Image (cartoon, rainbow, N blue to C red):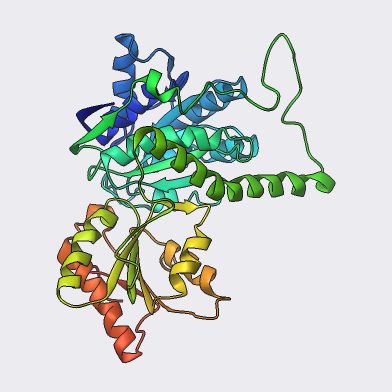
Amino acid sequence: MKTELMSANYAAARSAVSARVEVVAAYPITPATTVPEQIALLNEKGIFKGQFIRVESEHSAMFACIGASSTGARAFTATSSNGLLLMDEGLHWASAARLPIVINNVNRSVSPSWNIHVSHDDAYSKRDTGWIQFYVASVDELYHTIIQSYKLAEDERVLMPVMVNSDGFVLSHTLSTFDYLEPEEVDKFLPPYSPPHWVMDPKNPVSHGNIVFPESYQEFRYMMHEGTHNAAKVYEEVEKDYKKLFGKYFGGPIDCYMCDDAEVVFTSQGSMGAEAKDAITELREEGYKVGNARMRMIRPFPAKEIKELGSRVKAFASFDRGLSYGFGGPVANDIRSTLYHSKHRPIIKSYIGGLGGRDMTVSDIKEVILDTVKAVESGELGPEETWHDLMEW
């Protein structure tokens, strides 16, 4: 292991080398372009030893990865925003075919109106495709989570694709250190992929993708749900093994900070969750019992961890950098749904902001948390969701 200084996008490219990815297919889109660009350069230098496929669109990129994974090859791609949307058909195909593809989605606002900065709407809109979803807060976390994702996706109990989300520009173009692992080091953790089912092989032809009639179709979808659901438990094992080998641990599905005795817990996804730690530290010094729960995984949703937190806190201040139009914050509503049948049901306030790259400072995060503290103290919940520093309806 050696420490390198790179942007998150360059670190993502390096993870493809470390994980011995065999096929990368990609099409450029800001702010993800430098991920495949760097892989192409590493390929030309002989550092990335897999196949790099230049395709004509993101739709083709995903289907090239599907074809590669169907032969038993380890496949990877990267995209953003409208590019992820163009992949939609392929995303459903990959999960239904139980192909352990990994994608680095560099979160960006969906256009129009044109904006190339971070929002989480692109990934939120794909929550129901079957893909496991992670959101990372640092360059180091992105690099190691991509490697872990192959171990998770290729586990026979899971066999589902993984989307690792990183904030556009906030992480993608920001230089920071990460601990690089040579492929020989990763081999101890991640062996070559050996599919537990059939693969496409001209020497042993099989028919696949045939029509499934109503009497059987539902069972296929249940098995997808079961595989995604299993990912929560399997990831515990993956992180345990990774920590033992490399000393890296990022907190499990939810990275909690000062939550043990907290009365109000702030939740968010991505880089904002790291900044929130500073806000929590300052509020603790001011005498407030608050904590930070950074949601690293939202599919499968970490219901067990949320229920445990919900059993002892008075309120959640749930912040989403995206929204479900007409219904509010997606993760806030997932938390509400998870705790609906609980005996102790804390206040859950939904906050939406930071859209299109709008800056969310430590002071802004403190303001959100204190608004929830006020709701606890007064018993007045206010609106169903609060739009922070954006507009009044």
Is residue 8 left or right of 243 when viewed as pictured?
left
Residue at the extreme front: 244
* Residue 189 drawn above or below residue 335: above
- Whole-percent x and y of residue 179? 27, 31
The front one of 93 and 318 is 318
The front one of 312 and 194 is 312
Is residue 207 left or right of 330 when viewed as pictured?
right
- Whole-percent x and y of residue 17? 37, 21
Residue 226 appears in the picture as rendered:
yes
The residue located at (38%, 77%) in the rendering is: 315
The residue located at (28%, 63%) in the rendering is: 353
Is residue 390 left or right of 202 when viewed as pictured?
left
The front one of 324 and 46 is 46
The residue located at (28%, 72%) in the rendering is: 290
* Residue 167 drawn above or below residue 32: below
- Whole-percent x and y of residue 389? 21, 69
Q: Quadrant of the N terminus?
A: top left
Residue at the extreme right: 215
* Residue 274 drawn above or below residue 365: above
The residue located at (26%, 78%) in the rendering is: 371
* Residue 47 drawn above or below residue 12: above
- Whole-percent x and y of residue 117? 26, 47
Number of residue marks:
0
Q: Quadrant of the C terminus?
A: bottom left
Residue 33 appears in the picture as rendered:
no
* Quarter of the rendering containing residue 195: top right
